Structure formats: structure tokens, C-alpha cells
Amino acid sequence: MKTIRTAALSVVLLFAIAGCASTGRARGPVDTFVIPAALNPGLSADIVGELHFGTRQNDVVLVVPANTDVHALVARLSLNTEATISVISTGEKVVQQNGVTPNDFSVPVLYSVEVPGQKEAWRCRVTVRVEESNAQLAQLLFPAGSTLQPAFNPTVHQYDAALPYATTQVHIQAVAQSRYAKSVTVDGKTTAGAAAVADVDFSSIQSKQITIQTTAEDGVTRGSYTVTLSRAAPDSNSLLESLDLQGFPFPSGFSAAQSEYRLVVPYETQNLVVRARPQSGVAKVSLSSSALVNPGQPIAPMQAVSGDPSGKAGAVVEFPQGPGLSLLVEVTAQNGASRPYTVIVSRAAPDSNSLLSDLALDVGGGATALSPNFSPSGLRYMAIIPYATKQIRVTAHTQSATATLQLGGGEAGVAVQGVPSSPGGALVAVPPGMGRVSLLLMVTAQNGSATGYAIEIHRAEADRNSELAALTVGGSALTPPFSPRIRSYAVTLPPQTESAAFVAVASHRESVVSVTGQSAPAPAQNLNFAVKVPAGSTVTVDFTVRAEDGSLSHYVVLVTRPLAAETPSTAPPSAPAGPQTQPSPSPPPVQAPPAQTPPVQTPPAQTPPQVSPAPAQPAPAQPTASPTPLMGPDLITVAAKDLAVGQRELTALTAGKDSIGKSAKITIRPYRSSQTISEATTPVEIKRKGPTLTLSFQYRGTATLGGDGLVEVEVLIPTTAGKALYYRQALPAGTEIKLSIPFLLYGAATAAPWPALGSAVKVEGYASIAAEHREDAENFQKNAQGQYQLTLELSDAKSGRILGTATAWRKPGLARGQTIAVVPAITLSEGMQVRYTLTARTADGGAWTASGLAPVWTTQLRYEGGFAPVYLPLVDSLSAARK
């Protein structure tokens, strides 16, 4: 081992070791690595290593002459610190005498440099490479479109290159096989390195010979390639690949061999975009245009053309007027040969269609009927709009896309805004008090012919109905029961109730209800407010209903709140005397219809109620917001007698090896609530009759239901496998409810939640909740089955928008709680309030009506899945319409 001290180091000649820097140091202990000529016979000069610095290892590369024997070379390392040098290439440590010990460099040699005080040695991997003598080319490239003969081969040195006819400059690339090549020369231009690029002028000659020379890394070995450049013959293709005139198809299609075409374009055409693409990429396309005075007559002066027909955007030809154009598309080949393509363009006759395709009027979000129904050939129409209408929306569209449409009003002050054919239509402002408005829709065809559509609009008379449709006071009963024609009432609050919650609803959507007194709410069609009633006192509440025509009706309610110590009398205080205060008998409670028919539906307790009027006699009291529970318990009966289990359920029970339990759980809760009012169990009797399995049980109990809204009755019969047979239905919360179970479903849980509020549900009829039907004695128009026809119209209670109309047939003597189907079914939103009008015609042409408000609630499951259609609860007691 030999120790080399820093003072004895030679001057650093080259920093070329890679990978020898440790953390915090830049290069490591080795500064240079040299194979000196003085220590190695056969070398004429020192070989200095190229060092690449790394983390703990340096890579050193040396290039020696081709005739050098690399098997026993002596190297000298220059260090910048004291260190011990060893060779560890073979896995064994061989200590080196710097500048003395020879090594075989035919393979990489790995040095270990150990610095005192450092735990990890530095490494230097030395690679000695003999310089190359390869002077052959790897690639010889010419411009696209050129042809090299023969195909390039590094061992072939003579070539002929045919260049495109239009070539003015030849771009040549030459790449040597050896990346260590010293230089490449192309046509006298030398580039150092293994690749060269040169542009050779070829603008005014037909042929030229060029030379490509290479010099190998050894600087001695050279290669030479000769290429004779020749110009090819010019292209002679003068055919079109495609021809397009603004997308209008040629009757016979396009063919490059066909030179003449005829095309008819729409009358309104003002410009034509012409696109013509030649088959040859070097051919040129020109376009000229002339106007035809008349078909078959001489050609008029040239028309303006802008743009390149062979470009992506094409050329634009003006065609502002006149019967036709003559277009000449000429293709010129590279050799000067040309081919013309002629297109005669004719203008079509103007469209004469001046008819409408549709016409509609809209007032306040609802369609207004036209009389007669619209027909394109019908030119005169009449429409009736509500008295309160301030604006009409008119929508109309022409049959022809080229026709124009104008809308005007015939009376002063009638302003029209917008265009009927636009997405929002045209808005016509109707001045207040104007009873008649004339509108004229003028359709002008492309050829100038016109058709006028006249619409005569009449304003309906103001509604005179100043009656209430509903009046409720919390959960307390009015005396007498509410009727639109009874104007005075009395009501007694429970002692613990501090205020009376009033809901007063006018019969007509344009009528408003107001109440006198301090802090009274603003007048509205649907009035909700509360009045504080001191204990032991009576408060008078006065209502005024103003009809659309200004007519007034007054209602009075005396509200009494007894002291808590008092025992309220069974009879409420008498209402103030008057001609319309005769009491009416209280109606019986609303009963659920049979299980096979849709149930009577009323809103849940938390929903403000709406009650329809029955002008001929008092209507029953209706559910109210925030009901006060009845003082005594209500009777509940839930039963099933020999109820057959469905085949579907039997199959599922058998497949799951499941058995039916011996008891049923009955749960009563408010509609759409998780709160439990009552819960009980009752025994279940199971019988098998051949393949049929029947269940029987009966539950009778009591619970305080509240007297208003709906309650849910749920039956659950657990099974041994943890599932259940179940059924659920909503029923009116009366003093007695009875439910006969129609079927049982089988599953892992109880019935699915009721339809979401606002979701679409189907209404297939209504359930009568009228106390009686005195109109049955009237001589209505009847069919062969003795039924008279009812027309049901439904509208949104808030906006007044018409939701649909349907027809029902009813026999005289209809009992309360019966259901009537309507055709067609009407789709409404779950939970919404609707206004209804029922109309029947008498034999002498008179009309009997009933109207009011009703909620839309789903109340019954369906065996096939989902829910049974909705039946609206309506007070359908008719009275003669006022004239």
C-alpha cells in the first residue's frame, strides 16, 4: 500500500469524474485520472480521463487510439487529500501503487479510494474505449415526393434521386452510423459531429450531382456517397376530386368526368359558397361567375367572387338578384393542361304559403280556448278572458319558414310587445275596463301574398260571488256548521286554548277576505290569522268578503273561552240572531269507503284545511290547522275475516322457509308522521283450506285521534324469519274509524313511504263528503241508466291555473262517503290544494253547481305495488246557479 499526500499531488489537469461527490462535498478525493504516454509504451500522448461526478462514485471515461493494447495500462490518479487506492473489480481488494500498478482495462475497472477519518470509501469506475473507425452512413433523407434509386443501403455509395417538378431547393439529411463520427460533409458543407443538414439549390437546373462525405472518430477513416439529382416531369392531372355549392346536392351527384351541372337554389339565396378540391395537390383551381338575364338568354356581366375555391373556407359568389348564375370552375394541371366545369344555378320561385301552423292564447299561465278550435284555414276566432286579465300572451308560428308574421291591436291603448313566433310569444297589454279587444295576425308569404287571422277577445263579467268557501276556527266546531249562506256563528274554545286560529277562504280566486280590528292581516283570498281570547270572555270577529265586482258579504263569529274552573255547557253559545242563522243538523263523521274502493281523503292535521261550499244547505265541518283533540276517546276497529294470503306471498314464504306469527300489531299514527297515537296487539287465527291460507283477527280499541285530518292505520304480522305481512292505509280522523283489511303484503319492512310532496299522482275520482243531497229531486238530464252527468273542473288554489277537466256520472240518492270515478284521470301534485267546480245540467238547460277547495293526498297501498290512485274529498251537494 502506498500513501499519497496532498503536498505531493500534481496540478489538476481535468475534472472529469462523475458520481464521486459525497453529501456536503462537490467532487470527492479524485481530481484527475490520466494514462501517461511516458508510462505506457505505444502511446504518443497522455490520455486524460473524462470525469463525471456522483454521490459516492466517480465514472471515468478514456478514449485511446485504435492500436492501443488496453490489457496492461498504467494509470496515475491525482488526489486532493491523503488516501489509500485499491482495485476491487474482481471482488478482491488489490492495493495500487499510483503510476506503477498496471491493470486490464478491456473491461471497466473499479477503484476504491479510502480517506482517513471517513467510514465509507469513494469509488471510481474507469472505462477505456478504443476510438472508432466506422465512416458509414445510417440514414440519407430527401424531401417528400422524391424517389431515391436504389433504396438507401450503407454499403451502396452511388444513387439517383428523382425530385418533384416544382422543386427549387433540396433539403438533405445525412446521419452517420457511429455517434462518435468526427464530421459529415454534404455538397461541400461540413458539419462537426455525426449528422448534417444541407439545403441544395435546384431552381434553374434539371440535374446535379452532389457528394456526401463522412470522417470517422479516428480522423483517418472516411466514407463517400454520390447522389445524382434529376427533375421529374410535370403533373398532368386536371380533374376535380369534389365540387360543393353550399351543401346543395346535385340531382345526379358529382363525377370528376362530368363537366356540366344544373342546380336549383332557394329563392332567398343571396350568396353561394363554392368549394372545389382538385385531385392533384399541385393543380390550381379558378372560379368565375356570370349572371343569367333569363334562363336560355345571353349571359350578363360578371358577378363578384371572393376567396379561394380550393381553400378550406371556399369562395363566396354574390347572388343578390336575378334568375340564375353561370359558374365556371377551371382546374389547371402542373403541365399547363386545364379542364373546365360549368354549373348553371337557377333561383327557385318564391314560396306562396301564408298560413299559420298553430295559434294559442295564454292568460295567467293557463291556455284560453279559441272558438272555433284553431285550423290553418279558419281566419276568424273568438275568445273570452277572465275579468281581471291585464295581459294576454299570443303564440303563433307560420307553416313556411320564409313567411313573416305581424301582430297588431285594433283598439287604442292595446300595446303589443314581442313577436308571436318567438319562444316567449308576444305580450298584449289589455287596458283595465276594456271589454272588447280585436287582434289581427298578418302572415306574409315570400312572394308577397298575405293572409290575416282575426281574433276578437271579450272580457268576462266580473264575478259577483262574495261568499266564503271555508271558515274554520282551530279544532273547535262552529255552531251552526259552516255554510256559505249562513253569516253568523258561535264557537267555544277549550279553557286551555289562549287564541283562536282562523282560516277564512273566499269562494272565488279574485275575491278577498278582510277582518276588522287592530293588527288585522292584509286582505287576501285565503286569510290565516289568530285572535287572542281572554279566559272567561267572548270576542266578536267580523269578516268582509269583497267580490270581483265589488259586492260585499259580512260574516260574524262569536268566540267564547270559558274559565278553567268552569264546566263548559254541552251547547255552545247561540249565534247572533238574523235571517240566516237557523242551525243545521251536524253532519255525521266522514267514514272510510270500503277497502276495495279508494278512501275519502282529507288533509293531515298539520295542513290548513279548505272546504268547498254547498249553497243549498249547510256543509259539514272540515279539518283545520293545529287541531285540538276531542275531549273523549275515539273508537277504532281494524279487522280481517277469512282474508286469503296471496299466492305471491305464499310462494315467498315457502321459498324462505318462513311461517306466519300468531299475533298482529296495530299501530295508529298521524298521517305522514312517525309519532304513535296508539299501539296494540291482537291474536291471529290461521286456517288452511286446501291450497288457500286465510287469516282472521279483530281489534277494537279507543284513542284520542283529534277529530281532524288523517290518521294512518298499520297492521304488522311478524314471521319466524324476521319479516312480516303488513298493510297500511290513511283514514279520516273521526269519532269512529273502521278498517277492513283488503290484502296483506310480505317483505322485510313495512310499506314504502307515501309519495314525496310535489310528486305527480293520478286522480281518478272523488269521494262525497256532503251531509246530504237535496238536489237529487231536480230533473237533471239523464242517460239510459238513470245517471246525470257532472263536469269537474280543477284549478290551482294559489295561481288559479286550470289543471284539468273530467266527466263523472252519478245517480240520485248518493250517500255520504261514496266514491265517483271521473274520466279521464287527472295528474296532480301530492299535497297541493286544488279548487274544484262541479256542474250538472237540468232538462230545461239550467245549471246546478258546487265549488270549493280540496287537498290531494295518497292514502292507500296497491297490491300490485305502489299506491292506489287518489280520490279527492269533495262537498258535492249542488245548488242552482245564480243568474
Image (spheres, grey):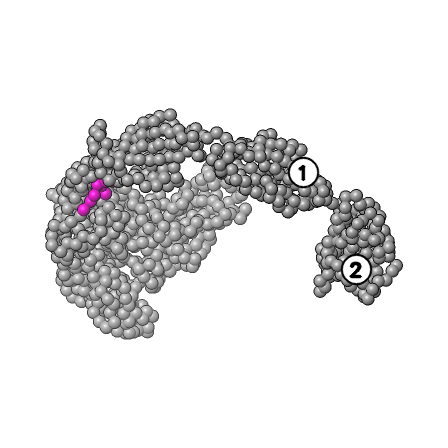
Please provide percent x and percent y for residue 579: 13, 62
Looking at marks 2 and 1 on the same chain, the residue that comes earlier in the sequence is marked by: 2
Which is nearer the eye, 538 or 300?
Answer: 300
**At 35% from the left edge and 55% from the top edge, which residue is drawn?**
710
Q: Name the residue: 80% across, 57% down.
A: 77
Residue sitting at x 39%, y 52% = 756
**Magenta region includes residue 438:** no
Disc 1 marks a residue whose amino acid type is Gly
Mark 2 vs mark 1, CA separation in Å? 40 Å
SS at circle 2: strand
Q: Nearer the viewer, mark 2 or mark 1?
A: 1
Q: Which mark is residue 78?
A: 2
Which residues, given as a range, are shown in magenta? Answer: 397-406
Q: Is residue 875 left or right of residue 841?
A: right
Residue 747, how many percent across, how many down? 48, 46
- Report x, y in % for residue 839: 19, 47
Rendering quarter of residue 646? top left
Which residue is the site of mark 1? Answer: 223
Say what amino acid the circle numbered 2 marks. Ser
Residue displayed at 67% across by 38% down: 223
Quarter residue 255 falls in: top left
Residue 216 drawn at (x, y percent): 69, 42
Q: Quadrant of the N terminus?
A: bottom right
Label 1 Cα neighbours within 10 Å, binned few <14 / some 14-19 / many ≥20 = some
Is residue 217 in view from this perspective? Answer: yes
